[in-house]
């Protein structure tokens, strides 16, 4: 059995909020994740909802700020919130820039040295972490959903689109939907994936959805007062790409809301219910 270390466990809404550390083969070193077990996990296997956080975030960010545990407890959902990248890599340029490197893994499998030896968040989230969780917690691997915020929204959309059948539900808050066309992606993707832009397209939700739809409706919430809206997020590009690809999409725009966790905590219940109904927890 793969070992995990319990960092902390605390009672929360009748269940348990835990933080854990383990050695990751994908990321070549220690990784941390947060996991919430609802009360139902004491007596049955439960569906799992993965939440991928954004730039500068850790496994603690959404765990502390999103307010997801109350309804997850009621619905019987396990919540998994991994860190956003490997840490303490020692690579030149891995720290000191909030848009690249540690805290900014972009949920890709890097192909360029030195990043390729540690920055393999795609494989970590899709394969290694679910296997680990199924080993150690009462989690039903056949009932998984995935969601995220901003860079994590990009991660959730690209992972769900690249792995048909693996996730029963997907949603995002203020996601990066076209990293090949916006400054955050143009900065990070060449360093992780090289100069060939066709490699970037494999991690671009707009490019992916034109070729392969997700079997279900994608839910996206976007604040109209989000400071990154017109420069980095551009949800209209995904709206257009979904129309072209025949993808069912609910894109909700909310006047006055920004990019923060005040926005996320306002609408998190809608996302949990969206996932719960696809995961057999109506
Ligand atoms: N440079 C700022 C802003 C960083 C920021 O806004 N991060 C977002 C995600 S942005 C896209 O992925 C975030 O979720 N921040 C965490 C939070 O608690 O709001 C900075 O360094 O703070």
Image (cartoon, rainbow, N blue to C red):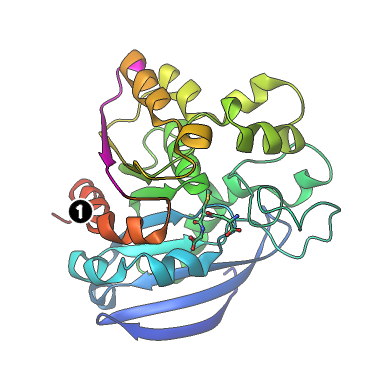
On whether residue 246 falls in the magenta region, the answer is yes
Residue 108 visible in this rendered orientation of the protein: yes
Give the residue displayed 47% in from the left and 46% down from the top. 150
Give the position of the N terminus as an image quadrant: bottom right
Q: Quadrant of residue 184?
A: top right
Q: Which of 23 and 233 lies nearest the eye of the viewer?
A: 233
Task: Tell me: 224 left or right of 274.
Answer: right
Q: Quadrant of residue 210?
A: top left
Task: Tell me: 122 left or right of 139.
Answer: right
Residue 240 position, x and y percent, is 36, 19
Q: Which of 251 and 275 lies nearest the eye of the viewer?
A: 251
For mark 1, what is the residue?
273
Q: Vertically, is 84 above or below 191?
A: below
Q: Vertically, is 23 above or below 203?
A: below
Give the residue displayed 38% in from the left and 48% down from the top. 146
Under tag 1, what secondary structure?
Answer: helix
Write down the region rendered in magenta.
Answer: 245-256
Check disc 1: other Cα within 10 Å, few if <14, some if 14-19, many if 20+. some
Residue 217 position, x and y percent, is 25, 34
Residue extending farthest left: 282
Residue 172 position, x and y percent, is 37, 44
Give the residue displayed 33% in from the left and 65% down from the top. 78
On whether residue 88 falls in the magenta region, the answer is no
Give the residue displayed 22% in from the left and 48% down from the top. 274
Task: Tell me: 276 left or right of 78.
Answer: left
């Amino acid at each position: 059995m793969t070992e995990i270390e319990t960092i902390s466990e605390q009672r929360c809404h009748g269940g348990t909020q835990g933080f854990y550390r383990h050695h990751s083969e994908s990321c070549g070193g220690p990784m941390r994740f947060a996991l919430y077990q609802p009360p139902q996990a004491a007596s049955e296997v439960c569906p799992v909802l993965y939440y991928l956080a954004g730039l500068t975030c850790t496994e603690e960010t959404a765990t502390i700020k999103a307010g997801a545990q109350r309804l997850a407890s009621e619905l019987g959902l396990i919540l998994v919130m991994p860190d956003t990248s490997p840490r303490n890599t020692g690579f030149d340029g891995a720290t000191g820039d909030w848009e690249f490197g540690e805290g900014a893994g972009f949920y890709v499998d890097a192909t360029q040295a030195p990043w390729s030896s540690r920055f393999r968040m795609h494989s970590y989230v899709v394969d290694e972490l679910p296997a680990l969780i199924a080993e150690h917690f009462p989690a039903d691997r056949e009932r998984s959903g995935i969601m995220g915020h901003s860079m994590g929204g990009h991660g959730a959309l690209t992972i769900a689109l690249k792995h048909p059948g693996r996730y029963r539900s997907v949603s995002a808050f203020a996601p990066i939907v076209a990293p090949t066309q916006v400054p955050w992606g143009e900065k990070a993707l060449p360093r992780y994936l090289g100069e060939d832009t066709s490699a970037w397209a494999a991690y671009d939700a707009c490019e992916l959805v034109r070729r392969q739809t997700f079997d279900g409706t994608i839910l996206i919430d976007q604040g109209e007062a989000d400071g990154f809206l017109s420069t980095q997020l551009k949800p209209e590009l995904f709206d257009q790409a979904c129309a072209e690809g025949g993808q069912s999409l609910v894109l909700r725009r909310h006047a006055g809301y920004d990019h923060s966790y005040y926005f996320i905590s306002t609408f998190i219940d809608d996302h949990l219910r969206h996932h719960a109904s696809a995961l057999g927890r109506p």
